[in-house]
Each structure stands twice: as C-alpha cells, then as structure tokens.
Amino acid sequence: MYRIAAIYHFTRFDNPAALRLPLLTLCETERISGTLLLAREGINGTIAGPEAGIARVLTHLRTLPGCADLEWKESRSAAQPFRRMKVRLKREIVTMGQPDVDPLARVGHHVAPGDWNDLIQSPDVAVIDTRNDYEVAIGTFEGAVDPMTASFRDFPAWWAENRHRFHNKRIAMFCTGGIRCEKSTNYLLGQGVEEVYHLKGGILKYLEEVPEAESLWQGACFVFDGRVSVGHRLKEGPHLLCHACRRPILPEDCARPEYEEGVACHHCVHETDDEDKARFRERQRQITLAEARGARHLKMIHEG
C-alpha cells in the first residue's frame, strides 16, 4: 500500500525558489511521486510513496519557515497514484487572483466534521460548494449551492452577481481539503459577510470521520490523483479520467459513442476540433506503444 499525504499550509516564504531543489531531491531519493506547489504564501500539494519515505518528507516540510505545525490528511492506495514527482514555483498555491486576500490575517470559523451536519441543516445557513463544476458534478453535500464555476478564479465574480441571494444568512463553505475555503472565507469577510464558517479538513476529513449512516454527503469526491474519486472512509471510487478534458467519467461512459480513449468523452467531444483530436490520437498511440514495451509514458492527470 502507498501512503498518500494531502498537504497545504499558509505561511510566509521569503524565497520559495531556494526551497524547491532540496525538496525535490529528497522526494526523488525517497521514491515519492506527486506534485507540490511553492509560493510566497506557502505550500500545497499531494504526494504518495512508501510509508518511511513520506514520513521523512513530512519531517523535512515541518522544518521549513513557519511550518512547525503543518498538518496533512492521509489515505492509502494499492497503486502509485502519480506518475512522477514535481515541485513547482507558483504565484499562488491555490489561484484566486485576489491580491488582497490573506488567509494568515483571518478566516472563517473552522467547523469540525462531527459538527458540520448540525450547522448546515440550520435554516439560517446557506451552504456553498467552492469547488469547480466538474468536481461538484460527481458529488456534493445535500442542499449545497453550486456556483457552477470553471475555476476558483471565477468565484469572486460569481459572488458579486449572487450575494443578494444570501442576505441575512450565515455562510458555510467547503472544498476538497480546506485550502480553497481559507481564501474564500477571508474574501467573504472582506466583502462584509459577518458570519462565515468552513469545514475543517474539507470533504476528505468529513468522509474519513463521519459514519456513512450519518452522512449528508451525496456521491463521490473528486481527488487530484490516479484514484480520481473517493467515497466514505476514503475508499477509492468508481470514476475514471478522460485524458482529453481531464473530467471524471464512469466506466459505463466508455461505451458511449462519443468516447474515444485519450481523445474525447461525452463531456468534451464538441469542445475540440479535428486538429486537436488528431493530436490527442497521436499522443494516445505513443502511450499505447510505451505500455506495450512495458515503459511508463507520462500520461498525466489533472493535478491541482
């Protein structure tokens, strides 16, 4: 079994570039795969590998400036869910495009998974899913508002257009692991919303801790690794990934006439032209040849 650690931590890195190579070297030495993002505002990502190797990387991360109290969420997978290791430098560890947003200044009230159900069932609470539309499509909390945004960067514009819907409401927000809510709750507080809450540890922590019989979660949770989706107790879900559009699909979707492996699915068949599809077919041909040789082709999933 591979140990998977999902990590995010807001802190101040004066020189994130200086942290990159030592971190990448350690991960490669310990046979760790995944993606970690470094920015001046902190670190974000998911890694997977042997138990001891993950432990050494987490120990190293806790030595970084301001990361002594770094936390992570763990799960297990029978197969390595990533193809390679990447440590990237970014402007933001989760892109919202709002320079005044500062999760280190203040965020919404953290709500433990065990207390989440009571909060979101209160009649004066509006529940908002801050994830992207393709994530929400396969699962969300009962009664949650779906902003139908293609990316997190779209959330401020959606709020500007819809804030009137939430007059005199307390706002409860959630996302996969909690990182987007650190920014979105700070943003809403800056917009004058008085009571803002968010699910501590995100959906992943809720699915891990709340018994299925008591759960208000419906469907599966999209994850940015080879498992594609997880359910209660973080059990791997049924979804596959369309490697053309990087959206989750079900096994039965592969029998639909729009589906061509690596080229298109029913979600994206009309979103690309013939030239795009020809390029995707060539990429898929190279992947098939590499697999026939027993090689590992870098057929990457969407990571974010």
Image (spheres, rainbow, N blue to C red):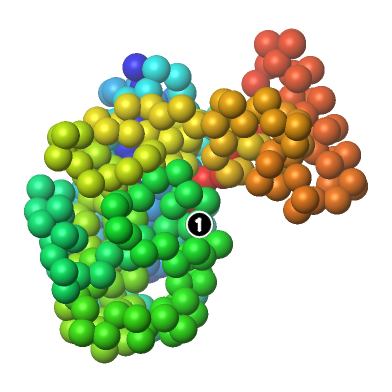
Which quadrant, please, contains the N terminus? top left
x, y percent for residue 132:
48, 58
- As displayed, is residue 174 above or below residue 298? below
Residue at image point 46% right, 27% down: 238
Tell me where residue 294 sits by quadrant: top right
Residue at image point 69% right, 31% down: 256
Query: Disc 1 designates what residue?
Result: 133
Q: Amino acid at mark 1?
A: Asp
Label 1 residue SS: helix
- As displayed, is residue 29 above or below residue 35? above
Residue 104 visible? The answer is: no
Q: Is residue 11 left or right of residue 200?
A: right
- As displayed, is residue 172 above or below residue 290? below
Q: Is residue 251 left or right of residue 2?
A: right
x, y percent for residue 38:
44, 56
Residue most toward the bottom?
A: 192
x, y percent for residue 241:
58, 35
Residue at image point 20% right, 34% down: 212
Depth order, front residue of 176/134: 134
Depth order, front residue of 101/159: 159
Depth order, front residue of 109/70: 109
- As displayed, is residue 50 above or below residue 276? above
x, y percent for residue 233:
24, 30
